[in-house]
Amino acid sequence: MLSADAARHGGRRLRRAWREPPDGAKRVYVLQVAEGVNLLGAFAGLSGRLWVVLQQRWPLEVVAEGEPLPPCQAAAMTIAPQIWSS
């Protein structure tokens, strides 16, 4: 679902990563969008589509190309498997 709609929201790459919070590992999707794309708009558009079509919420993070990233997102963009690209 995410990969089918990612390009409509300025997506360039989609990766599936794992976070390890104290309460257990969780899958998260990290979408890298083109520079200048509205991050909140991309997040809201994709999250809304997931809810309308699947009645589900998936952990999604949206980051911009060329912007400095926190360590967890930088690691995800480096080592997490890429599941889609434009």
Image (spheres, rainbow, N blue to C red):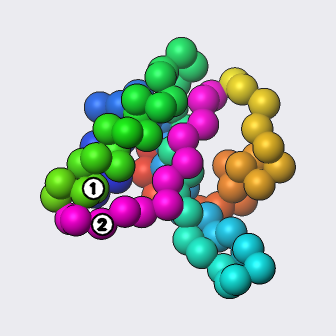
| In contact (CB < 8 Å): disc 1 and disc 2 | yes
Q: Where is residue 73 drawn, in percent x and y?
A: 71, 49
Is any atom of residue 27 visible in this view? yes
Quarter of the figure with residue 21: bottom right
Residue 58 sits inside the magenta stretch: yes
Query: Which residue in the structure is indicated by mark 2?
Result: 56
Could you say which is closer to the camera, residue 43 or residue 81? 43
Dot 2, crowdedness within 10 Å: few (<14), some or many (≥20)? few
Q: In the picture, residue 7 is in which quadrant?
A: top left
The image position of residue 11, as x and y in percent, is 43, 35
Front-most of 76 and 81?
76
Query: What amino acid is found at the position of numbered circle 1 in the picture?
Result: Leu
For the residue marked with disc 2, what is the amino acid? Gln
Judging by the rendered image, the residue that carries numbered circle 1 is 50
Residue at (56% x, 71% y) in the render? 27
Q: Nearer the viewer, residue 16 or 19?
A: 19
Closest to the observer: 14 or 51? 51
Query: Whole-percent x and y of residue 83?
Result: 46, 58
- Which of the numbered marks, if any, corresponds to residue 42? none
From which residue to which does the magenta span run?
54-65
